[in-house]
Image (tube, rainbow, N blue to C red):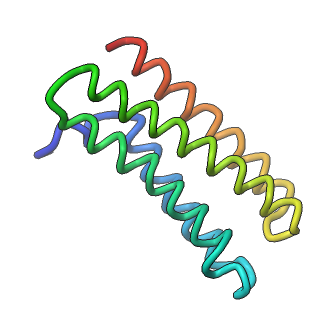
Amino acid sequence: MAFKFEELKVWQISLNLSNEIDVIAKNFPRIELFSLSNQIKKAADSVNLNIAEGCMGQSKAEFKRFLTYSVRSGLEVVSCLFMASSRNYITELEFKRLYSEYEQLCKMISKLKTSL
């Protein structure tokens, strides 16, 4: 692996979740194309991108700052999941599974931040 972030479990999980969100968001109604669909995809991608960007930074303090951004983006995804669920764009089962996975991911990112 050429880059340090590729070895991080949180980065690998966030990449997989980002891909899952992309697939789900494609099934949202067309009217949501430039709003909720776009927002949830950007937030999911941001979790992953902030881990990668911060990992390659100059200091632990900088990495911690990017991990904070990553958790915030994860919370944004969860909020978007609530909206998608309330609008019946996703099933209750999809909501519960993704909610749980993002909850675990945010906890893992927070633990990584604390360990630095």
Left or right, 11 with respect to 63, comes to right
Give the image quarter of residue 3.
top left
Residue lying at the far left in this picture: please name it. 2
Left or right, 88 with respect to 50, comes to right
Place of residue 68 in the rendered image (x, y in percent of width and height, measured from the top left): 45, 31
Residue at the (42%, 52%) spot, across then down: 15
Q: Is residue 2 above or below residue 40?
A: above
Residue at the (26%, 44%) spot, across then down: 53
Residue at the (40%, 32%) spot, across then down: 67
Residue lying at the far top in this picture: please name it. 115
Residue at the (72%, 47%) spot, across then down: 97
Place of residue 96 in the rendered image (x, y in percent of width and height, measured from the top left): 79, 46
Counting labels gives 0
Place of residue 24 in the rendered image (x, y in percent of width and height, measured from the top left): 65, 69
In the foreground, 81 or 19: 81
Place of residue 116 in the rendered image (x, y in percent of width and height, measured from the top left): 32, 14
In the foreground, 97 or 41: 41
Q: Is residue 66 above or below residue 42?
A: above
- Placement of the N terminus among the 4 image quadrants: top left
